[in-house]
């Protein structure tokens, strides 16, 4: 099992206090003369002539009625080849979509009450993140099927964001720094014995630990990257869980950014390096820890890819690559000849995403893609049936996600990702075909009616197709609208619960998010169509998105604003 800074856990955004963002705003056209009752955030506007008048129009649309609108086109996890498609505004049921009450911002933007649930390898315990009595995120544990929840860690300052189980099913490993210095150490604590004290497994001042890996065949050892030898380079060390003794395993030659481990022998057999001269990325492999490295493949600037995993016999490996394709494909490569054997999965619309394998046999089970919604291509009929069952059991239109699996792959922690509610977690028994609810990430949101998110396709003026997401406060008339622009720009918007979109929709605004050119996930042509186009065609995409919304009677022409952070702000 390989685990890094974000691991299987979603990084939590900080609380957004929009009242502090006023100085960052700049109007391009007139400001609506009436002041809103709430301290609205007005973001920095760019070359498009978009008004911020929407921010003052809440009084016109503040009173909402409940609506049961659900967009059938975007419901559920589709099989490969189906997407949300172009949304017809006439097909959307008329009405108001969100709660009549103002949803407090601390409920929308606050830390989750439950996050990152993870089964112990033996499936007997469930760990998760939850705030302590003082409001600091810590790791909690309960016995599966019981309500004996107890706090295991006792961090009182910054909170714990990243953790995993050791293979003994008793020890929790987590990362934490000291006073915010960002030199994260690996800590271990016994989750079974009450009152256990955490032990620093990388107790070196000024040293940062990362790239933590465990292996069930070597339960008393972990592999971890540390800049112990050289502050600028991360070597890989083997650390004994009982004694914390660290032994240098693989030295970084100076250009390696990450490492890849072969599971059968728990040996570092792959390395991803960067060439600063031409910005290329190199994947190197070796046959054993005693053998020399050789180049498996190189991704020149403009190409992308990475090594995914080694086969059980360590003769081939799975690689993600854009070489020879506009979108990223999953291919199999021969480790001896360093040549491509076959293309396993690809989609002309978007890049390949997560790869699901049997951790013992390395059999490929499923591959995901995300154009507008999450789609999966299955290579195992039993796993295909599992996801079909989960779709039936979950909330209407939700996307089932595998968050954690036990060692035998009999029990899964699943999350149901929704657009109109917080993440719902459950334990799924593959043999018994039962789904036992655990908790939701933000229970306070369950008391409010939230808007649905529609998938839309928008054509730019030069014919480029852009996928986006529309969250409306009402569907019977046009309303003020906020164009919510993602940062990066090498990032993307995705379907699912979005606190900013719900906050604005609840106050009476339509919210449009568009994956403009230079967004990631849609192939290298789409990505690099934004090269040297800041303020030019990238900005035209945003303007075209607004014009589309006006033409579809979503937005009022003179009541539109633009808002976002990073590139989006």
Image: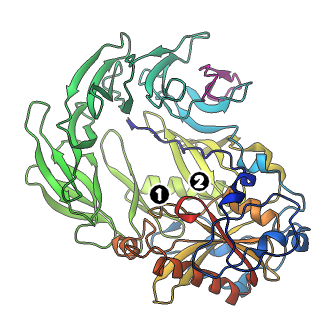
Residue 16 within the magenta-colored segment of the rendering: no
Residue 452's x, y, as percent?
72, 66
Mark 2: secondary structure: helix
Residue located at (72% from left, 54% from top): 18
CA distance for labels 1 and 2: 10 Å
Query: Between residues 374 and 361, which one lies in front from this camera angle?
Result: 374
Q: Which residue is mark 1?
A: 384
Density class for disc 2 (Cα within 10 Å; few <14, some 14-19, many ≥20) is many
Image vertical order of residue 115 relative to residue 521, above or below: above
How is the model colour-coded?
rainbow
Which residue appears at 62% of the width and 63% of the height? 564
Which image quarter: residue 168? Answer: top left
Give the mark, 1 or 2, whose residue is nearer the N terminus: 1
Q: How many marks?
A: 2
Residue bounds of the magenta highlight: 137-158
Q: Write down the residue under mark 2.
A: 390
Quarter of the image for residue 73 reads bottom right
In the image: residue 315, left or right of residue 87: left
Image quarter in which the C terminus is found: bottom right
Quadrant in the rendering for residue 313: top left
Instruction: Identify the image quadrant of the N terminus.
Output: top left
Whether residue 262 is situated above or below residue 393 in the rendered picture: above
Locate residue 486 relative to residue 230 in the image: left or right: right
Q: Is residue 145 magenta?
A: yes
Q: Residue at x 67, y 29 (%)?
A: 136
Which residue occupies 56% across, 82% down? 458
Image position, residue 379 (x, y; %): 37, 58
């Amino acid at each position: 099992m390989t685990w890094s800074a974000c691991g299987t856990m979603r990084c939590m955004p900080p609380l957004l206090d929009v009242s502090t963002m006023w100085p960052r705003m700049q109007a391009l056209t007139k400001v609506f003369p009436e002041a809103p009752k709430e301290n609205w955030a007005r973001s920095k506007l760019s070359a498009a002539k978009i008004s911020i008048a929407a921010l003052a129009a809440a009084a016109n649309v503040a009173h909402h009625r409940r609506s049961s609108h659900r967009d059938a086109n975007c419901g559920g996890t589709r099989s490969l080849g189906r997407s949300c498609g172009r949304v017809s505004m006439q097909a959307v049921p008329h009405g108001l979509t969100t709660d009549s009450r103002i949803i407090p911002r601390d409920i929308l933007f606050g830390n989750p009450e439950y996050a990152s649930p993870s089964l112990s390898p033996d499936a007997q315990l469930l760990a998760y993140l939850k705030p302590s009595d003082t409001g600091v995120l810590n790791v909690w544990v309960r016995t599966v099927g019981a309500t004996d929840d107890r706090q295991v860690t006792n961090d009182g300052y910054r909170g714990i964001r990243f953790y995993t189980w050791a293979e003994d099913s008793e020890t929790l490993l987590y990362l934490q720094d000291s006073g915010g210095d960002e030199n994260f150490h690996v800590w271990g604590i016994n989750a079974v014995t009450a009152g256990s004290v955490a032990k620093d497994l990388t107790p070196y001042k000024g040293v940062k630990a990362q790239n933590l890996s465990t292996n069930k065949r070597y339960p008393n050892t972990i592999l971890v990257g540390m800049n112990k030898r050289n502050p600028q380079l991360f070597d890989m060390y083997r650390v004994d869980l009982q004694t914390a003794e660290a032994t240098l395993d693989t030295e970084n030659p100076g250009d390696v950014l990450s490492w890849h481990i072969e599971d059968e022998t728990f040996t570092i057999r792959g390395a991803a390096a960067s060439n600063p001269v031409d910005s290329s990325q190199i994947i190197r492999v070796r046959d054993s820890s005693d053998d020399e490295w050789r180049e498996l493949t190189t991704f020149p600037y403009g190409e992308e890819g990475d090594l995914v995993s080694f086969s059980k016999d360590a003769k081939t490996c799975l690689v993600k690559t854009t070489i020879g394709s506009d979108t990223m494909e999953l291919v199999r490569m021969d480790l001896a000849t360093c040549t491509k054997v076959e293309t396993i999965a690809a989609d002309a619309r978007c890049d390949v995403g997560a790869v699901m394998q049997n951790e013992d046999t390395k059999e490929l089970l499923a591959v995901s893609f995300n154009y507008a919604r999450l789609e999966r291509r299955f290579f195992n009929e039993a796993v295909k049936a599992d996801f079909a069952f989960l779709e039936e059991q979950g909330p209407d239109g939700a996307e089932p996600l595998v968050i954690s699996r036990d060692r035998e792959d009999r029990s899964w922690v699943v999350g149901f990702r929704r657009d109109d509610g917080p993440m719902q977690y459950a334990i799924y028994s593959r043999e018994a075909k039962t789904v036992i609810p655990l908790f939701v990430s933000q229970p306070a949101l369950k008391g409010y009616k939230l808007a649905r998110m529609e998938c839309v396709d928008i054509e730019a003026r030069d014919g480029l197709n852009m996928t986006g997401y529309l969250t409306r406060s009402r569907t019977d008339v046009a309303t003020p609208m906020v164009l919510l622009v993602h940062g990066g720009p090498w990032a993307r918007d995705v379907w699912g619960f979005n606190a900013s979109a719900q906050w604005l929709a609840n106050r009476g605004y339509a919210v449009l998010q568009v994956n403009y050119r230079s967004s990631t996930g849609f192939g290298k042509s789409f990505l690099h169509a934004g090269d040297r186009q800041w303020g030019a065609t990238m900005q035209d995409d945003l303007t075209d998105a607004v014009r589309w919304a006006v033409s579809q009677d979503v937005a009022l022409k003179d009541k539109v604003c633009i808002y976002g952070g990073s590139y989006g702000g």
